[in-house]
Amino acid sequence: MAMVDEDTRAEAPSGALGGAAAIEVSGLRMRYGDHDVLCGVDLRARRGEVVVVLGPNGAGKTTTVEILEGFRARSAGEVAVLGADPATGDERWRARLGVVMQSWRDHGRWRVDELLAHVARFYAPYSEPGRVRPRPVDELLETVGLTDCARRRINTLSGGQRRRLDVAIGIVGRPEVLFLDEPTAGFDPEARRDFHDLVHGLADEDTTVLLTTHDLDEAEKLADRILILAGGRVVAQGTADQLAAQVPADAEVKWTRGGQRFVHSTPDATAFLRGLLADSGDEVAGIEVRRASLEDAYMTLVHRHETGDARAAASAFAEEVR
């Protein structure tokens, strides 16, 4: 995966569009009737960076991605993807993007290799120096693990194989920015691991990847930076370790001594272990230290936001009925 230094990985959006960012969003808003789905989202992704967006259902993840892809018109805010506004991006701009949606309707009677060859033809006119489009079909099939399924009809594929095909369609044009909306739904553990390797390889090729998922383990493995979206707002961002550090939680220390298992919670695991080893020395074995995880951080930050919204709503209602 592309390496970035710790000081810049979790940097906040600059607020001004432009520069070397592949994606830059400032003050993004989306309203349906009287309901605000997005309430001033700021987001920035550099070339070769993998950004994972987490959030509960209804947080606005898919809406954000669809706006960046140019599939949905925003209500307000500034958006630039590869230097262009998605609302007015032309075909040459679209050829530089890859999209893997949560689902789309099949061409079930097509054979796998025939569909990929058909889709690939649309990218051929948009090759550029250093990025030849499209990928050869045989290479693409091998990349996503579908070589043995090349001549099968799409309606005979398993759910996991169908999802691999979705990914193949998303990367056939060697995208500079790849949008992945819940891409590993239906994947078995082997397919999930292969997909993670694929994302790492794309980042090494300087492809920017924006991915939504509910799988926190996947987010931790893939992300250079994680954004947590709740109630249409970015409530936190950073690496998994940086997010976990925002949650005040004692470390849990486990160890065995004399065949017995012990567990102790402490705000300072290092000091506790130093004292434990000084007192018991060689009698202590099987030491484990569990600190706050990404899951702990995610649950705490989302709950904190939802609790704050509930209090604000109650306060507004109280003012209204006075």
Image (spheres, rainbow, N blue to C red):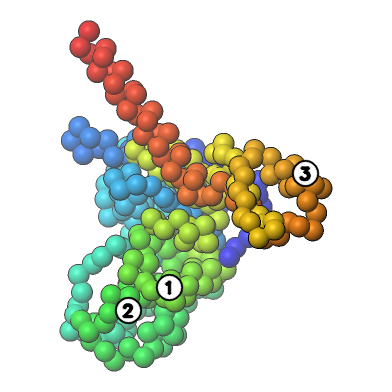
Q: Is 174 placed above or below 32 here?
A: below
In this rendering, would 284 be left or right of 65? right
Q: Position of residue 133 (x, y in %)?
A: 43, 76
Hey, which quadrant is residue 100 in on the image? bottom left
Q: Secondary structure at mark 1?
A: helix
Quarter of the figure with the N terminus: bottom right
Asked whether the beta carbons under mark 3 and mark 1 sit within 8 Å of each other, the answer is no
Give the residue type that dot 3 points to. Answer: Gly
Q: Nearer the viewer, residue 265 or 182?
A: 265
Q: Secondary structure at mark 2?
A: helix
Q: Nearer the viewer, residue 62 or 122?
A: 62
Q: Nearer the viewer, mark 3 or mark 1?
A: 3
Q: Position of residue 188 (x, y in %)?
A: 38, 74
Hey, which quadrant is residue 161 in on the image? bottom left
Which residue position is annotated with label 2?
Answer: 161
Which residue position is annotated with label 1?
Answer: 189
Which residue position is annotated with label 3?
Answer: 275
In this rendering, would 4 be left or right of 70? right
Query: What separation in Å lies between label 2 and label 3 (alpha carbons)?
Result: 53 Å
Query: What separation in Å lies between label 1 and label 2 (alpha carbons)?
Result: 13 Å
Give the residue type that dot 1 points to. Answer: Pro
Which badge, 2 or 3, comes first in the chain's sequence? 2
